[in-house]
Image: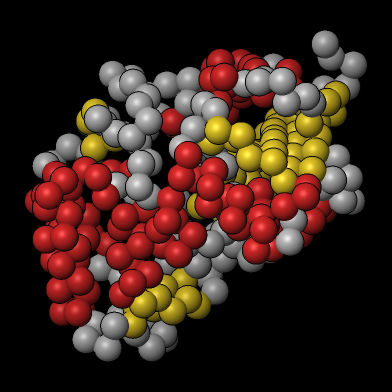
């Protein structure tokens, strides 16, 4: 759990409708890499912890008999259900509104458990130990995130880059200099060093894999607005009666950068860490 911060249900309140449009995709080869390194063949069960609108679970659904997504936000669970129906996988997908700390929640055992950029919001030692016990012997816990160490430029692409720094400065002008997180503040950011947590839980590993990104993406102004409102620190409700003013300022900033309303971007690479529960362990 983040020091000096307590979970509350408003952390991602109102962000779900913006998430699928606003967030950048994982690297396009992620499912193929996981299928190879985990020897997935369409059988078994996947548990996606902190599933959001099902971004990761839905992209991997074809590799399992069943996928179960767990998230505490009702809006995210509703979006995940809609996404499963759109993809024709609703019969093999189950969405559970619960905090990770409430697991195992009678969900049974799993072949693979994933955390897609969600683990830092949890009571990490408790959740890691619980999820380890929910894995079948030899099962895998997979920690997935954008690769933070690469530099992505729009050189050679047709439109300006998304002005992320200016957008974040605009958020600070409206909400203050300290990052918001639900009803609280997050002055020191979210924790790292996941490896120590997973090792304490009794998992072995990790095996690291990087799935290359770099694909050219074209983003509209609406896409970028959706990105802003998909972030916990810029959730729509945080702006109160100034929400419309904030959005108007965002759109004005974007028009100044790109009058044609188009932005270029390169997709991030995806970093994957695979941890294992040993065979024969209780």
Quarter where residue 227 is shown: bottom left
Query: Image height check: is 234 above or below 161?
Result: above
Give how far across and how far down residue 13 sits, in percent. 35, 41
**Is residue 46 toward the left or the right of residue 222 in the image?**
right
Give how far across and how far down residue 59 sits, in percent. 67, 57
Query: Image height check: is 196 above or below 157?
Result: above
Tell me the residue at 25%/30% (across/down). Answer: 183
Residue placed furthest toward the top:
282
How many badges with numbers are in the image? 0
Tell me the residue at 24%/82% (across/down). Answer: 258
Give how far across and how far down residue 192 sits, in percent. 44, 31
Q: Nearer the viewer, residue 126 or 156?
A: 126
**Is residue 228 toward the left or the right of residue 94 in the image?**
left
**Is residue 187 toward the left or the right of residue 222 in the image?**
left
Q: In what quadrant of the picture does the N terminus appear?
A: top left
Give how far across and how far down residue 239 sits, in percent. 17, 47
Tell me the residue at 24%/45% (across/down). Answer: 237
Tell me the residue at 83%/26% (across/down). Answer: 136
**Is residue 247 toward the left or the right of residue 87 in the image?**
left
| Colour scheme | secondary structure
Residue 43 appearing in the image? yes
Residue 40 appearing in the image? no
Quarter where residue 195 is shown: top right
Q: Nearer the viewer, residue 108 or 143?
A: 108
Query: Image height check: is 176 above or below 120?
Result: below
Q: In what quadrant of the picture does the C terminus appear?
A: top right
Q: Nearer the viewer, residue 49 or 153?
A: 49
């Amino acid at each position: 759990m983040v020091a000096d911060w307590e979970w509350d249900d408003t952390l991602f309140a109102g962000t779900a409708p913006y998430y699928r449009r606003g967030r950048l995709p994982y690297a396009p080869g992620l499912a193929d890499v996981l299928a190879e390194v985990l020897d997935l063949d369409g059988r078994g069960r996947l548990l996606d912890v902190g599933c959001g609108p099902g971004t990761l679970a839905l992209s991997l659904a074809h590799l399992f008999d069943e996928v179960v997504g767990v998230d505490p936000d009702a809006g995210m669970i509703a979006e995940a259900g809609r996404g499963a129906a759109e993809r024709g996988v609703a019969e093999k997908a189950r969405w559970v509104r619960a905090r990770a700390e409430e697991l195992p929640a009678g969900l049974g055992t799993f072949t693979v458990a994933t955390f897609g950029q969600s683990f830092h919001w949890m009571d990490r030692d408790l959740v890691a130990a619980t999820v380890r016990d929910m894995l079948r012997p030899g099962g895998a816990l997979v920690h997935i995130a954008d690769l933070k160490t690469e530099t992505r430029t729009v050189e050679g692409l047709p439109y300006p880059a998304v002005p992320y720094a200016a957008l974040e400065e605009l958020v600070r002008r409206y909400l203050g200099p300290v990052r918001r997180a639900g009803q609280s503040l997050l002055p020191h950011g979210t924790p790292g060093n996941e490896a120590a947590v997973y090792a304490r839980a009794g998992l072995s590993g990790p095996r690291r894999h990087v799935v290359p990104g770099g694909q050219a993406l074209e983003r509209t102004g609406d896409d970028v607005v959706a990105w802003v409102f998909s972030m916990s620190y810029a959730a729509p409700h945080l702006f109160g009666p100034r929400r419309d003013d904030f959005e108007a300022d965002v759109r004005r900033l974007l028009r100044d950068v790109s009058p044609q309303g188009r932005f270029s971007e390169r997709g991030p690479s995806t970093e994957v860490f695979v941890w294992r529960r040993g065979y024969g362990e209780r």
